[in-house]
Amino acid sequence: MQMSNTVEYALRAVVWLADNPEESHTSSSIADATKMPSSYLSKILKSLSHAGIVYGQRGVKGGYTLARDPNGLSILEVVNAVEPVQRIRACPLGLEAHGKNLCNLHRTLDDVMIDIEKAFANHTIGEMLKKPNRVKPLCGLTVQGKKSLPNDRSTGIRR
């Protein structure tokens, strides 16, 4: 199972903002730094702003900052702001015999979705930034003032 681009981009943007808190950043600068389409990111940032996850300021000195402490911001909150985990609440086939009860297949699939929600809820954006790892989150970012390249041995970053 793969996450949608929307969820991936939202998480990338939030992690990047959490790792770069010193000033506000334009949507185009965030898009450039995180390797995503600027127009698509603008829509995602609006959703994150409506959810209170990022703060957007318009104008010459405008831009986006993280509105929440990354240590208290769960992955689930970011996911739910842009594309909530889809639970199975009733028979997807619309079978009247099932009513609101789920068959074993759909009950099992819904249980998996519950586990995914729990896993996302139990991990914060701040944790991702604190975990020791040779590879910096969002491998396209600069390291020691040098732009990393794919499989650049001098920076220790691999894509």
Image (cartoon, rainbow, N blue to C red):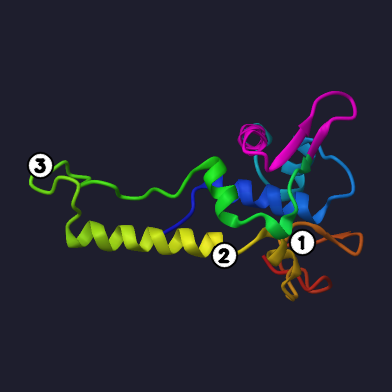
Residue 102 pos. (x, y %): 20, 54
| Mark 2 crowd level (few <14, some 14–19, many ≥20, 10 Å Cα) | few
Between circles 2 and 1, the one closer to the viewer is: 2
Q: Which residues are magenta?
A: 41-64
Q: Label 2 is placed on what type of residue?
A: Asn
Residue 124 pos. (x, y %): 65, 61
The answer to whether residue 28 is above or below residue 34 is: above
Quadrant of res 111? bottom left
Viewer-closest of 71 and 83: 71
- Residue holding disc 1: 149
Q: Is residue 14 visible?
A: yes
Residue 56 highlighted magenta (yes or no): yes
Quadrant of res 40? top right
Labels 2 and 3: the sequence-earlier one: 3
Residue 70 pos. (x, y %): 73, 56
Residue pictured at 48% horizontal, 62% vertical: 118
Residue pictured at 51% horizontal, 65% vertical: 119
The answer to whether residue 156 is above or below residue 111 is: below
| Mark 3 crowd level (few <14, some 14–19, many ≥20, 10 Å Cα) | few
State how far apart marks 2 and 1 are (Cα): 33 Å
- Residue holding disc 3: 96
On screen, residue 59 versus residue 50, left or right, reads right
Q: Is residue 138 visible?
A: no
Q: Quadrant of the N terminus?
A: bottom left
Viewer-closest of 91 and 141: 91
Quadrant of res 51? top right
| Mark 1 crowd level (few <14, some 14–19, many ≥20, 10 Å Cα) | some
Labels 1 and 3: the sequence-earlier one: 3
